[in-house]
Amino acid sequence: MPLFDQELTVLNVGLSAFADAIRLAGGKAVEIEWSPPAGGDRSAGLTLARLVNDPRVEAANRAAFAAYLAAEPVLEGIGRAAEVIPGLRGRTILHAGPPIAWQKMCGPMQGAVIGAILFEGWASRENAARALAERGEVLFSPCHHHGAVGPMAGVISPSMPVWIVRDPASGRRSFCNLNEGLGKVLRFGANGTEVIERLAWMATTLKTVLEATLGEAGPIALKPLMAQALHMGDEVHNRNTAATSLLLRRLLPPMLRSRASRDDIAAAIAFIAGNDHFFLNLSMAACKAMLDAARDVAGSSMVVAMARNGVEFGIQLSGTGDCWFMTASPVVDGLYFPGYSIADAAPDLGDSAITETAGLGGFAMAAAPAIVKFVGGTPDDAIANTRAMGHVTLGSNGGFTLPAMNFAGTPAGIDARRVLDSGLLPVINTGIAHRQAGIGQIGAGITHAPLACFTQAVTALAATLPDE
Amino acid sequence: MASLAKIVRNFYRDSVTLMHLSARLSALPGVSQASAVMASERNLALLREAGLLASDAGAGPNDLLLALAGDEAAIAAALAAAEQGLYEAPSTENGGRQQQPPRSLEMGLEETPGANLALISTPGDYATAEAMKALRLGLHVMLFSDNVPVADEIALKRYAAAHALMMMGPDCGTAIIGGVPLGFANVVRRGGIGLVGASGTGLQQVSSLIDRLGGGISQAVGTGGHDLSAEIGGMTMRQGVAALAADTATRVIVLISKPPAPPVAAQILEEARQAGKPVIVTFIGADPGPIAALGLTPAKTLEDAAVAAVALETGRRGERSHSLPEERPRPAGEEGSRRQRYVRGLYSGGTFCYEASLLLGESLPDVFSNTPVGNALKLDNVWQSHAHTLLDLGDDVFTRGRPHPMIDPRLRLERLAAEAGDPETAVILLDIVLGYGAHPDPAGAIAPAIEAAIAAARASGRQLAVVGFVCGTAADPQNLEQQEARLTAAGMKLAQSNAEAARRAVRIATALRGA
């Protein structure tokens, strides 16, 4: 319809006096709170402009988002990493985040790698383990390149037990290691005797009990369990109290029916019940399955991974294959445990931002008022966070609803274009590791995915799309 | 450095609340470390390691422990505040539920799905991207920003034309769409006259004169200053002509521009001829012959265009509400005024300076300008007037590092005083622009300087004529009548249009030459 035949409604970008004048004159004007997009990078801003409402990108995003929604990850079993994870051969160790060489790894990741080498028996002392890594006799590869994810250091070595999650819709499998609990644990870089002994116990006793239990239970659908946990105050990233309880409730009857010994069962139950975060690694594997289903749709600007290796923060888009778009990982200005401060913190670390990528964690903050104080905020702030993420996502996931927002679905499917255009950065709930190996978690807080990743990603996506 | 610990028995708070409290206490002046924890074994051990706890005094897991280190007085006060804080109800005020204001055009469109035009006035570096986004989202665009590369302008206008969208600008200062003033625009009566103009002040002059003459505006489309160049080819003006031709409310069309590149003019005139409506063409300074030959109505000045348009719209002859008064030159024989013979124009609107230069150049020799046209010559030093001088004070040379004179009158006030002090100055010409975007009280801002200029000349035995006009309407926020009254009271000889003001200046100057 020609402009002259419509009632005029103006979107005002720039001088706000113009919007005021329109309203004074009786017209309708909406003020855009504008700042230079892409952090003022003019060239990236122009590239972005050419992708706005591009029909090829819109169609690709619809397809990618539909695949994400269609995924129905189920917990299928538990297995030895080398036997189930594709490409995990010989002396290979998987780690969190984008690719990184041994020399560049942060303290906690190096500590975890040393722990894994000791656990595997490739060396018997810390010095020898370090030397092995330095000589290049261990191959390193990101978890994400193998359908896997891991919290914090995200270290997975061949003999470790891993969760096996399968999405029948896509046929893909995803993997995650098992959560060790808090305190001195491998994922924060601890590698002392108690850590190695615990890993050994998990690889034997716990694995055996869980194998028997899952054999008895059959596949466990994870989305309904996560949805229920959202209604019980979890956002299934930094709070997994409800989800862990729900899982344990599901596991107890088959566990008691199984052939596992009574002592082993008692030990397994004590271990799971003593760790509020036990479910986190399953939440991550489920999110990984949902997002892998959305991968490799040509032209799609949907983010399918956000991950940190403690040095760099990287993201991947559905439309750009296995390319990582990376920048320095931010240090989290969160709340610190007694005696620690931001000066002690390692830069943001871990694959657990896969939960935010899937529309959970920080994106579902409205579900978890109990942890919003991490941001120094209130439940109202949590709702504002969730709502803000609605502006940078492709849609909402009706499978995960938020009671505090009239049961609206969680915002999901981050559109890199919208992040770049609005400057609203994906919010991530995260734990904070000490910069030195082995000290462990020293705090928690809220951080944001860095803009530079999105600038690179959108530019790279544009390069895959010929000018029309 | 002192340390202090306090146990609050059987008082549970979750760890996050306590971390939050710890952070708040640590931030207090004089407090070096602070910790609020439930006194579990693990937490007690941590505090001991951190050197915050000398003895745990039998605290248990259900007890809350506050431990602080730092300046003695400070930690005592902090401890008291912390205890107080534990019992306070949490604040419920905050803006968390407020709507996030839109931060991009796409967000704006999501929240206001009926939006149909983007008015963009970002710095030029970002203007192309915003305009392209707007077009891609199906929005018509008015791009106020300048300094947009020609290649970008072509790309934007091609995209818009291919998608049936109006692309006004870049460098488009004025438009009136559906009765709504956009950018720098006057509040005019609605009616049957549609305007398309490359010049913002040109559109303001014609639309406000039409209003003054009793006519009304259907739409006023701005094309931006570069549209009629050979490279751009008048894409927006052609789009505007076509849209006004199709618009049932528009009965008369007026085109306003400096003379376009010749092939562009030919194409526009040909398309205007096919509009099926009367078209008045003001290509200021252009040869009227080819225009009239196509059956279109040439108008020499912006005022002529307004008069002709109202005549065509209303069917009655538009009356100029004025006749030029006799100008009385200075009383003969006054010594101090013998050298007084020149016109000095200080314009805030570039098109006004342009039009006045043409009109003065027709009748007077030695007309100089920083932006010369017609018979006018280039002024070597823009800071020093020479003979008849007309200045466009909105030109880059004057606006570098300071706001446009329509918004910030200071530069013009300084120059006004300087011209008044020049014994050769006989007439000072001024334009006063009203409407949205303009100064809130331009007459009030310049009237004292006019009074001072006249008084200063008189003190030197000279009679200085200050001639000017107000471009505006009765409905403008500044109110035309009050502005004119203020200027008349200050001693300004008031014309109703730029052309009339220029002609009065010519008459005075001519009379002085003859004297």
Image (cartoon, helix red, strand yellow):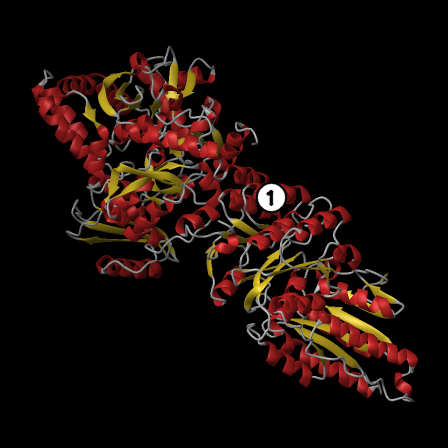
- The percent coordinates of residue A222 (x first, y second) are 22, 29
Give the residue pinned by disc 1: B156
Q: Can residue B403 be seen in this view?
A: no
- The percent coordinates of residue B168 (x first, y second) are 60, 52
Residue type at mark 1? Leu
**Around disc 1, counting alpha carbons within 10 Å, would you say few (fewer than 14), some (14 to 19), or many (20 or more)?**
many
Q: Which residue is drawn at 27% across and 33% down?
A: A183
Of the pair B1 and B495, the residue shown nearer to us: B495
Of the pair B503 and A143, the residue shown nearer to us: B503
Residue under mark 1: which chain is it in? Answer: B
- The percent coordinates of residue A334 (x first, y second) are 36, 45
Of helix, strand and loop, which one carries label 1?
A: helix
Q: Which residue lies furthest to the top in this view?
A: A90
Left or right, residue A202 beside residue B480: left
Q: Is residue A221 visible?
A: yes
Left or right, residue B389 beside residue B56: right
Of the pair B414 and B361, the residue shown nearer to us: B361
Left or right, residue B178 beside residue A179: right
Q: Which residue is drawn at 45% across and 37% down?
A: A416
